[in-house]
Image (cartoon, helix red, strand yellow):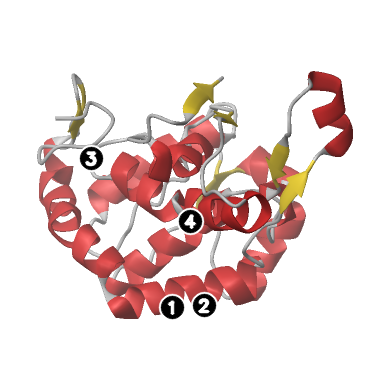
Amino acid sequence: MNPYQIDQNGFYGAFGGAYVPEQLHAVLQELQSQYRDIIESPAFQREFHTLLRDYVGRPSPLYHARRLSEKYGCKLYLKREDLNHTGAHKINNALGQILIARHMGKRRIVFMGALDIERQRVNVERMRMLGAEVRAAQSGSQTLTDAVNEALAYWCACADDTFYLLGSAVGPHPYPDMVARLQSVISAEIKAQLLEKEGRDYPDRLIACIGGGSNAAGTIYHYLNDERVGIVLA
């Protein structure tokens, strides 16, 4: 078993699984039993990729950074996820999980920290214009950690119609795998773009930053078993 690929119990080698309150066992099992079939269905793929193209603005460019290349003595490309609608890679996964939630009949999804709502006012107004109700987490620091805590508490109480949507590659199985699969659009595009620009579909080195992990998981997804590619995560 490749320790970088998930097994049937939701583990990556020694890490992973689902350690959650008993109230969430049934809803997680429901998600585990459905998410792969939903993601791999032709209907989901059509709608997901149509939204990525027409709403997000994908594919994001693969930009040859000429001066950086000259400075470091290599040919360096930047994958411009910052040019996506809303300015980051997070929207890839957010759209995918919202579609999964809709396929499962879940209608409640959005929590944000009160301070984050103020910081992200433009994006929050866009969400509200599109019909979303954004719940403000007022506890603690009123930021992401507290929004996650309040979302989990709400999920425990209202699991029948609530989908816990998480942007990072963390949380109980199947969330890390689900996030990686949805973000894998990044590495799929890199392969096609490198083939067009360089005549081969792989780089010598693939470098990605790690915060919550979704950017890195998507960037390396199609290269995990490619021994020609040196993967650097920082």
Where does label 1 land, which residue? 47
Numbered disc in front, either 4 or 1: 4
Q: Are marks 2 and 1 in contact (CB under 8 Å)?
A: yes
4 or 1: tag closer to the N-terminus: 1
Report how far apart the C-alphas of labels 2 and 3 lie in the structure: 27 Å
Disc 3 residue type (three-letter): His
3 or 1: tag closer to the N-terminus: 1
Residue at the image position 10 percent from the left and 51 percent from the top: 26
3 or 4: tag closer to the N-terminus: 3
Residue 136 in view of the camera = no
Report how far apart the C-alphas of labels 2 and 4 lie in the structure: 13 Å
The quadrant of the picture occupied by the N terminus is top left
2 or 3: tag closer to the N-terminus: 2
Pick the front one: 135 or 195: 195
Residue at the image position 75 percent from the left and 48 percent from the top: 63
Numbered disc in front, either 3 or 1: 1
SS of the residue at dot 4?
Answer: helix
Disc number placed over residue 50 in the picture, else none: 2
Where does label 4 land, which residue? 185
